[in-house]
Image (spheres, grey):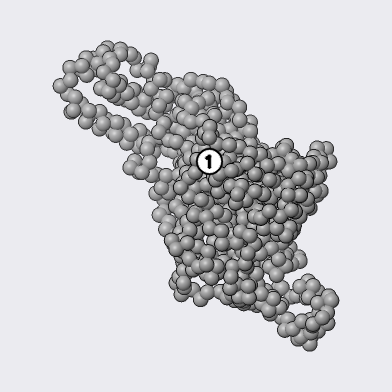
Amino acid sequence: MTTPPEVKYTSTSLSLSSLITCFISCFVIVSCLLEGLCVTSKANALSQSAMLSLDPLRWDHVVDLNEDFRILWKIINQDITFEIQARTLGYVGFGFSPDGNFAGSDIAVGWVDKGQTYFQDRHIKRNGDPEPVVDPSQDYILMWGYENRTHTVLRFRRKLDTCDPAHDIAITNDTMRLLYMYNERDPSHGSVKPGHLPNPGSSFRPYRPIVLTQRPHIQFKHEEYVRILELRNEDVELPGADETLIWCKTFKLDDMKRKHHLIRYEPIYDSPASVHYLQHITLRECHGMHQELEEMAREQGRQCMGARDIPLACNAIVASWSRGSNSFTFPDESGYPMESRQAKYYLMETHYNNLQPDLTQLHANRQMADNSGLKIYFTHVLRRHDAGVLSIGMDPNWRHIIPPGQSQVISEGHCIEDCTAYAFPMDGIHIFAVMMRTHLIGKEIKLRQIRQTEELPPIVHDSNIDVAYQDFRRLTTPVQVLPGDRLIAECIYDSSSRKAITLGGLTMKEESCIVLMLYYPRQNKLTTCHSLPSLPTVLHSLGIEQLATDSNPVLISAPPELAGMTLEVRLLSYDWRNHFNEFQEATRRGSFKPLCWGVKNRVVPGTEYLEGYSINVTKTYKKQRHCKHKRLFVTEETMPDISFPVLHEIDNNNVIEGAARSSQNSASETVHGLSKAQGYSQTITTTTLILTIVYLLLQHHLLSRRWWQCWHLHLT
């Protein structure tokens, strides 16, 4: 995003000017006391330099939604502060959609016109009109707004949950669909009447899925002892239309004579066109010295149906990237172990699929070959813990059946207690990041943890997932999983738009229910912990009592009314509308086949012929919602006063922070946002705090002759 030209800030607000003058006086006092420097200066001469260090806020996140629109945000307690930096001198809007569409969206709209900032909490009705209307309850609070020659900047805050479900969308740990809009024109005379927002429909840009409550990304510093390796595909022909291509390429890494830690990885895009095709990239560790591995490492790669399509011990996941995510940096205490003596060959599995092909663009700019991949960072400076990746969920298989025409279909993949008891160390493992994956009709995923018969709080839960955003989510604190705990990946699908059944599988037309867990310390006994409905459970859920033996294709022999029908015909002709509930009950309560493998595709002993069942949970977990109505502001004890324009670049993330500064500002006087009374209240509170500090300093240094001389020089 191009940095706009530097402009100087001049206040036009009387109350803000008074506050600045008061602060400048304090600035002079503190400078004299701490440094012993007496400098004669006027308040006007010091105003700009003093303002350079007034903003204590450090943004946790910064995202460019496109080249013209940047958002920054920070969460403190139950409040979230946003700043919009948009390349326009017209109105801007930012908010949230329940599903990516306009209807039912929650959005804040603002603009600066002739030095006056206008700001409103709005929403979009479900009547098809894209223009946001003003909410009866104004829950977005403007902190300031200004513009320069190129940009409009608004800073505002709100509660994570405003307790206004009729017009606002609560900000939770779910994936949020960010809506944003901007136009080159302002509404006439600040009007808020319907129809006065210029061209609202064309001002919206495509929504962006993101998790706002994600922990701040770890700042990666590339030390001299960190090595970089690029693992790229070679001239992979991209699939046409909406087809899925899974490509496997093997690499031989035989120069790691001693143990290293992988500490970061990121995607490599061969070209801008690659971004639209790449769905997943998974790097797997292969064990053994098979001749086939050596031959594969010398070839260009091959089409495959996942790593298990190749009969080699490449079951352990090293790194995984999905569409919508960027890089992943391991926490300082852990790294994934890599050593040639343990694993010399690595398989990179790449899923190509274009979810929304623009046929015109494809025809004009068709990229025939792709060389994308992963860039990995590793070091011989070892960290405290070896990290590992464990896959939990439903195994990709036809037995994973999702009926059509249903708003909620629940599937569960069990990692049973027998497998965790066998593999996990006595003190358990500690999960620090989680990635959740479904395909096109998935809408909710939860990773449940059950200890004996008690269900603990979910390790992670997203009730609004998006296939275009499946990133590793850092947990606030690592979650301990003990030997004997059961883990359940619970996925909910919305198949109401489909007329035929959807089966489990690897392609995007099929469905998935997988949760990848990053944890420490690593163990090698369990890398995949999936399950599948047993064949008797599947047959029972379809009303089938018995299959005919030695028939090809497979025929049903009982009950009599289904005799002679093939299994495929039964799946396609089943009356899902009237018998869905029976199907759902049978699949959730019936038996399942546990599938537990270690690093060399070795089955966990004792699970080969084991049949699993759901646990009878005696103590369930229920999330409590505590909504405190209309506490619109945080207290001074929980959040620093940040009602000052920022005149300098705080950190490397804020490209515009030091440049998009305005000679048009109205932080203390706004319309339909932060009222004059509220602005004065903030000024009085902050001024009182400053004067209190000054009073205490005066008491301590009252007899200091040098201080009196300095203060006298300042006044004169």
Is residue 62 shown left or right of residue 56? right
Question: Which quadrant: the C terminus?
Answer: top left
Using the image, determine if residue 709 lies above or below residue 19: above
On screen, 313 above or below 221? below
Depth check, front residue: 281 or 51: 281
Residue under pointer 1:
380
Q: Is residue 632 left or right of residue 22?
A: right
Residue 100 vs residue 306, the one in the foreground? 306
Which residue is nearer to you in this view: 544 or 533? 533
Q: Nearer the viewer, residue 293 or 583?
A: 293
Horizontal and vertical percent position of residue 304 = 76, 55
Q: Is residue 646 visible?
A: yes
- Residue at coordinates 49% horizontally, 73% vertically from top-left? 617
**Residue 67 on image: x %, y %:** 63, 33
Amino acid type, callout 1? His
- Identify whether 45 is placed above or below 178: above
- Which residue ends up furthest to the bottom in the rendered image? 560
Residue at left offset 60%, top offset 72%: 607
Identify which residue is drawn at 19% across, 24% down: 701
Q: Position of residue 468 (x, y in %)?
A: 65, 49
Residue 570, position as x, y percentages in the image: 78, 75
Q: Residue at x 76, y 65 (%)?
A: 499
Residue 581 shows in this picture:
no
Which quarter of the figure has residue 712? top left
Number of numbered discs visible in the structure rendering:
1
